[in-house]
Amino acid sequence: MSMFKRKSKERVYTRYSTAGGGVSRWKETVEKLMTPEGRPEVLKDVLILDASSANFSGIIAASLFAEFGAEVIKIEPAEGDPCRKMTPFGTHVNGTGIPFIMEGRNKKYMTLDLENSPDDREIFAKLAQKASVVIETYPAGLMDSWGIGYRQLSVQNPGLIYIAVTAYGQYTEKAKNFVNFPDTDITTQTGSGLSAQIGDLPTEPEPYNWPLKAGMWMGWYISGISAALGGMMAIIHRRKTGEGQIIDIAGMDAYSSMTGFPATIGFTWEKSRPRIGVLDFILYPYGHWKCKDGLVAIAAPRDHDFRALLKILGRWDLEDDFKYTPDRIPDIIDMAMELHREIEKETMKYTADELTAKALTYAMKAAKSKWRGGGVPIVMRVMSPENTMQNKQWEIRKSFKKIEDERIGKFMITSGFVKMTESPPQVKWVAVEIGKDNEYVKSKYL
């Protein structure tokens, strides 16, 4: 079946042959991938206490555990976690911000004042005796000073997995000196050094030469994903050995890992990689170009892909000067920008759809011809969020789910961030009412 749309109705297709398994087998596989309901929940027997405070990284980690079936109890004071107030444009639903609602997947809520009440700390310690995982984001050592840190809780529960998320970790001199330094998303991003590498060229006029933060709370999300991944490995380890452990997540570590090879390059070259704006000094052409109706992303980094792009754009005259990768990625930024501007002269003559169609047509002909050199330049429109949501891909893959709650009404959230046939994540409900499960938790665990 062709991967290209031949009718107005979009179709599901598989890259795999039906030989050996038959049509019914791959249809069954696709159906299971797209319908997680009713599948086994691999963490159904796991109790998680989320004591995160004013920090979305722990809340995000807890959400991932909850989607795989863990019973997650969000612990917060009677006035609620400060994260409830963080929301775009001050938009709240019954007093709760949109990001907190998004992270309310499959969770239960209990009120305990860990900061001020010794009695509530004692209740927390009793819950921790039955818990598999504790997540906390308080300043390093604070939970320990309250008598409910890993050092104390692991005595009563040796199998406890204790996840602590802070800016610099728990056990270094810097962690001590910056113990009250807030682990916010922006500090994680800037402290990692990655922000300094994102943004326009330093030679551009202000304000365009400023470093940029990446996306929506990427520091918190990466820390949360790191915490969840470490926690899952610890759960597997405990099932094999019975041993618990502490997981020390430093936001700076987690986000710095995203810098990847630039750190190695800097060590090798003895200088850091500068901000390079629209350029890419490893693959090129590989970036964004203006067109008649917006922007297109182009990826044509291999020599034969680049030659194919020149044919599509009608600029074979550039082939001689930029024949090989080192020609297209020179040490001098002005030389690299020369090629970028020449390409943009051509892309500005077309709409995004016209450029995409030209690239697809060329690729289909190249696949059938031994004379075209096999070059396959990739061209696609840079989508706005509004345009992206109109893509039938989301509907087919069921990437979003409509939820209704009696207190917060109807809304849509992302769903099924990973597709699995046998043990997928599931969103069963979304709730955010403070303390709504106090009696449930007490009757079940205390």
Image (cartoon, helix red, strand yellow):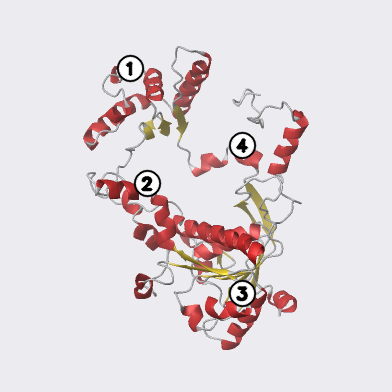
Work out whether 148 lies above or below 240.
below
Which one is earlier in the sequence, the residue at label 3 or at label 4? 3
Q: Amino acid at mark 2?
A: Phe
Residue shown at 44% from the left, 21% from the top: 375
Which quadrant of the figure contains the C terminus?
bottom right
Q: Nearer the viewer, residue 214 or 93?
A: 214
Q: Is residue 103 visible?
A: no
Which quadrant of the figure contains the N terminus?
top right
Q: Between marks 4 and 2, how big is the CA–CA gap?
A: 36 Å
Residue shown at 50% from the left, 13% from the top: 369
Q: Amino acid at mark 1?
A: Trp
Q: Which mark is residue 35?
A: none
Which quarter of the picture shows residue 429?
bottom right
According to the image, label 1 marks what residue? 316
Which one is earlier in the sequence, the residue at label 1 or at label 3? 3
Image location of residue 328, percent across then percent down: 30, 29
Work out whether 201 lies above or below 294.
below
Q: Amino acid at mark 4?
A: Lys
Q: Which mark is residue 261?
A: 2
Q: Between marks 2 and 3, how big is the CA–CA gap?
A: 38 Å
Q: Which mark is residue 392?
A: 4
Q: Between marks 1 and 2, how big is the CA–CA gap?
A: 33 Å
| Nearer the camera: disc 2 or disc 3 | 3
Q: Residues within 10 Å of mark 3 (few under 14, many from 20)?
A: some
Q: Between marks 1 and 4, how big is the CA–CA gap?
A: 37 Å
Q: Between marks 1 and 3, how big is the CA–CA gap?
A: 69 Å
| Nearer the camera: disc 1 or disc 3 | 3
Q: Amino acid at mark 3?
A: Pro
